[in-house]
Amino acid sequence: MDSRFLETFLLVAELGSIAEAARRLDLTPATVAQRLSALEATIGSKLVLRSGRTVRPTVAGLRVLPRAHAVLRELRDLKSAASETALPAGPLRLGATPTALTGIVPGVLKRWVEAYPQIEIYIEPGATTALHSRVMDGELDAAILVQPQFELPKTAAWHTLRREPLVLLTPSSLRVTDVLQTLAREPFIRYDRHVIGGRMADEYLSRKGIHPQVRFELDGIENIARLVAEGLGVSVLPDWPVVGLPSQAVAKWPLPRPRPVRTVGVLWLQATVRAPLVKAFVRLAGPAPRAPA
């Protein structure tokens, strides 16, 4: 059985579309359909049903899905274990939030290439909640994400990379003499309350008795920073380095104490074949800087 056929089946099942799977795999739809047919012939059961442009797994396909994931994980582990060097073979499958991709990952990757040029890293962007699930399910070896606000299982390991106090972000042209008055007076761009940093900001404002004049609510620190740079409002965000054009157009102001702090780090499962690769990545990432009080 060709493992690429299993990977194709899983992607088609996830996306519900042969055409979209073909685009992701850089193949023709006909090639994807041929792979599915070959896999079905090998297994001896119909795995997907086509209805117009959509595709869904059959009953047999649904039963095969978790086993297909397990088979591919075992194959990856087998290839990693078959290494004649001190570290397992790659690739290291690493997840990262969008802000981690711009603020942390590039510097660590530069040091990684210098130290381990022969070991590939596969990087998957995503939100903290999705990346956490992917690591716990064994689909990713590690992820750089916001530390969950619940206790991690003993099978997991955590290394803190950054501690980020929340700050008031304003256009650089706005003069601020009182942070809380500014938050109460100016149009407010709310950081999505479905993410950890957004919940922290919302709870802080509630404790301070501030009811901001919300103009927009969205996820994405960089996206919010651009809106603030355009003069569309102010926001409360983790103190993340603002990358690119908005950095000169915005200003950061410390919040009155006690100010919440968001923690960003690396999450991984300890007893896996590629855990030594994760630990090597963590060593290159270095210790976490101390957050301002």
Image (cartoon, rainbow, N blue to C red):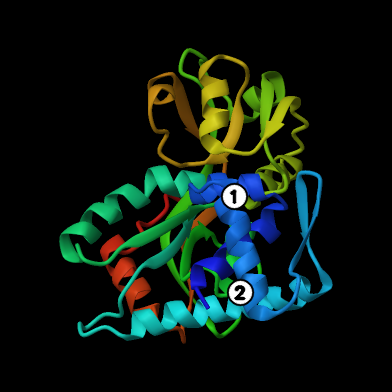
Closer to viewer: mark 1 or mark 2: 1
* Residue that carries the numbered disc 2 in the rendered image: 137
Q: Position of residue 218 (x, y in %)?
A: 67, 34
Q: Position of residue 260 (x, y in %)?
A: 58, 50
Residue at left offset 44%, top offset 77%: 76
Camera-side residue of 217 and 164: 217
* Residue that carries the numbered disc 1 in the rendered image: 30
What whole-number distance in Å separates the C-alpha atoms at marks 1 and 2? 31 Å
Residue found at the very far left of the displayed protein: 114
* In-image side of 109 versus 222 (left or right): left
Is residue 259 among what the camera can see? no
Q: Secondary structure at mark 2?
A: loop
Q: Position of residue 113 (x, y in %)?
A: 21, 58
- Name the amino acid, label 2: Asp
Near mark 1 (Cα within 10 A), the count class, few <14, some 14-19 or many ≥20, is few
Residue at left offset 38%, top offset 27%: 244
